[in-house]
Image (cartoon, rainbow, N blue to C red):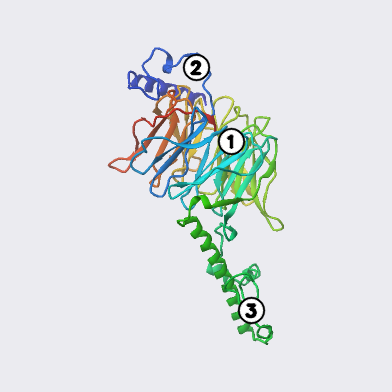
Amino acid sequence: MCRSALVLAALVGLTAAVQKDEYLVSGVKTGTTSPFGLSPEILENIPHDKCAVSIPVPGNDDSMTLVTLGINREVWLKTFNGEEWSPTWIRMNITASSGPSAIRDEKDQLHIFVRGMDGLIWHRFEKDGEWSDWLHLGNVKTTTGPVAVINSEGLISVFALGSNKAVWVNTQEGLSDSEGVCTSGKAFPTAEQESRPENSESIATTDTGFDDGSPSHKEVGTSLLELSQDDDEKARLDKELIQNATQEAHREWLRVDSLKTSSDSVKEMKYVWSGWENLGGVWTSKPTVTINNEGLLSVFVRGVDRSLYVASQETSAEHGLVWSDWVWLKGNFASAPKVSAITMADGMTVVTARSTDKGFYTKKQSNDVTGVEWGQWEPVGGLWASGPTVLSPNSDTLDVFGLSTDLSVWHKQYSEEDEKGAWSAPESLGGRFSTSVSVTKDTQGLMHVFARGHDHAIWYKSQSADANNVAEWGTWNSLGGAFKGFPC
């Protein structure tokens, strides 16, 4: 780690020399007499694991939306249409006590979640350019901002710490319309699955295959069903009943689907939530959530002993989907750390956090014939002044971003081209910033980096493909505004 730190320090010095007398970047001129343009007192008081912007997954057309918390604690939004940014920030008409969490669902609809001044989690969503009202998710007081994730059914699960410092979760169950409550999940069986004999018993039907309340339901005389039938005829009728039931289910799904994409007013749509579930524990950090290749969620938090812990969804024959007990991942991490967790192409989860020695450490799952287990904490190298942001733009690489001790954005990449894998030398992206980095990638796999400058504005830097189709970084650009940092 010492060698890596020396390399990083040397690169920092070189970068500072090259950038001397450059134009104003993020509100701090690099050529000032104080190191890095800031006095030692200010450097010492820089908030560490704070974020400044929530970035949903980019849209299908490479559009992007930034959701931020203003210095007046109002929530603001700015959009990118794939070619240029909107000229102004849009006020979302709510005062929040936390940073926002924003996410896009499978319909490319934007959802924003915040912790209100009353401690409740509030939700607002957009459809076809029209916004719903703000609605809260139930009377559970929280002590952190929300974390939203799309689960395997295409529904949103929201996590936060409650007033008892335990992790709580609330999940969408469907939509409420004039005809009642209907599921908005997507897990209907395929034709091949329907044809399997072992699946036929799992589809509950009436004698006709339709629900009694369905407009397609027709009474059938019992004499018809009591007639003796040979095996072929019975199999044919059983298959027909299953097909009828499936068609009915698909009609219901299409009705819900059309509701979500119809021209009806967004004000008339209301999501139905499961209600808050307590996952237990006493924790000292905002939850971090990831989903694996099997569609199961895992939530990571820091305990009072400064270690990380994880609880994961499991399948149970008796109870269906349940949460595991909390598993100790060890470690010794900074106060309220920014924990980054992602799932790699092999289905294994990698978690990264900043330790009390200001180094980034990663821990990865591995699997063998005995099952899945966690490895040791491995150092990334370097000294860091913010929490990590991790992205996996390709199947065999891991990209880590953070602020170094010079408050510039630095980048390292882990490659698994050989059996052991290795971290690249650190790369400086320049700038001077006051929060952790937020990173997203577009449909081409190009990365876009965002952070808050010392002028309180949001700054960004993007990759583009050169003539040889190799990604290269552009320059820092300001999106303006005045924003607060908030726990990641």
Q: Is residue 365 left or right of residue 480?
A: right
Distance of label 1 from label 2 (alpha carbons): 30 Å
Instruction: Please name whichever residue, 439 or 456, is drawn nearer the observer in this view of the structure.
Output: 456
* Residue 265 x/y as whole percent: 48, 52
Mark 3 vs mark 2: in front: 3
Q: Quadrant of residue 31?
A: top left
The residue to which callout 2 is attached is 42
* Residue 439 x/y as whole percent: 45, 37
Identify the disc placed on residue 84. Answer: none
Residue 202 seen from this side: yes
Q: Amino acid at mark 2?
A: Ile
* Residue 435 x/y as whole percent: 49, 28
The residue to which callout 3 is attached is 219
Residue 306 higher or lower than 173, as above or below: above
Q: Residue at x 39, y 12 (%)?
A: 33
The residue to which callout 1 is attached is 116
User: Which of disc 2 and disc 1 is earlier in sequence?
Assistant: 2
Q: Amino acid at mark 1?
A: Gly
Instruction: Please name whichever residue, 412 or 179, is drawn nearer the observer in this view of the structure.
Output: 179
Q: Amino acid at mark 3?
A: Glu
